[in-house]
């Protein structure tokens, strides 16, 4: 992934709310911002600018 393996591992554990796009902790059952239960894991691949 990136240059720093430890940072990449921390970022990979984040879950993102599908409703408001807020970042939440790994074990979250509902969004901290809007209360929605529709969460997805953060994308693990890096996007590179062209």
Image (cartoon, helix red, strand yellow):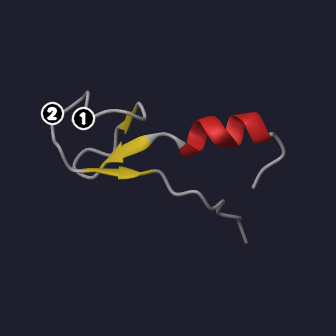
Q: Residues within 10 Å of mark 2 (few under 14, many from 20)?
A: few
Calculate the distance from the C-alpha at mark 2 to the C-alpha at mark 1: 5 Å
Q: Is residue 22 left or right of residue 1?
A: left
**If the image is split into quadrants, where does the C terminus sit?**
bottom right
The residue where tag 2 is placed is 35
x, y percent for residue 15: 40, 43
x, y percent for residue 48: 71, 64
x, y percent for residue 13: 51, 41
**If the image is split into quadrants, where does the N terminus sit?**
bottom right
At 68% across and 42% down in the image, what residue appears?
8
* Location of residue 12 by image quarter: top right
At 78% across and 50% down in the image, what residue appears?
2
Mark number displayed over residue 31: 1
Q: Is residue 42 left or right of residue 29?
A: right
At 65% across and 40% down in the image, what residue appears?
9
Q: Is 4 above or below relative to 50?
A: above
Q: Are marks 2 and 1 in contact (CB under 8 Å)?
A: yes
Question: Mark 1 falls on what kind of element?
Answer: loop
Number of marks in picture: 2
């Amino acid at each position: 992934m990136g240059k720093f393996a430890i940072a990449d591992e921390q970022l990979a554990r984040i879950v993102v709310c599908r409703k408001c796009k807020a970042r939440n902790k790994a074990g979250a059952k509902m969004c901290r911002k809007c209360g929605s239960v529709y969460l997805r894991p953060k994308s693990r691949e890096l996007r590179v600018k062209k």
